[in-house]
Image: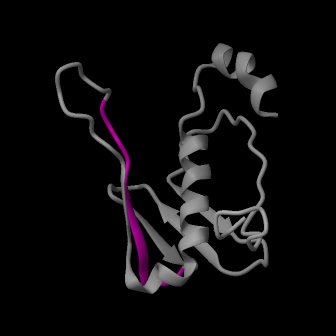
Amino acid sequence: PEGGTEEGDFIGDFELGITSDHSTAKWMWRSQGSDPLLIWDFRSLPATCRLGSFSSITLAHFSPVRTMRRPGHPVVLPYIEVHPAGQHLFDDILMSLLIIERKRRVPITRSSAEESRGLFN
């Protein structure tokens, strides 16, 4: 729910599953009301979020952590920047990114995917 309490507006619902296809560079998100269609493009970093397939309007950028944490070094955190054009879609942008990042981090080996299947399906 939106607003920090159980009485807030409902903003989304999802179910996670494991896939063996990790080559996806573009991810689509459609909110509960079927609009808007957000396209996340991970072909280059930072990843870019746009409204619809043919839009040139950038809604947000996301820089994921690309390295493992190293002892004795500062922690590197992922970073999201929501542009003014995306402010009214903040809930959808954030929720879509949380789900995409979870799916991108699913185990890629066959044995680990099979072991995890019961956790996510």
Q: Quadrant of residue 35?
A: bottom right
Rendering coords of residue 110 (x, y %): 66, 19
Does any portion of residue 21 appear in the rendered image? yes
Rendering coords of residue 94 (x, y %): 54, 62
Magenta residue span: 54-67
Query: Which residue is found at the position 42% from the left and 71% from the top?
Result: 60
Q: Quadrant of residue 74?
A: top left
Nearer to us in this view, 63 or 10:
10
Q: Where the N terminus falls, by quadrant?
A: bottom right
Nearer to us in this view, 46 or 71:
71
Left or right of residue 70, residue 1 in this image: right
Q: Where the C terminus falls, by quadrant?
A: top right
Query: Which residue is found at the position 50% from the left and 53% from the top?
Result: 25
Q: Is residue 92 above or below residue 45?
A: below
Q: Is residue 85 above or below residue 26?
A: below
Rendering coords of residue 43 (x, y %): 40, 55
Q: Quadrant of residue 9?
A: bottom right
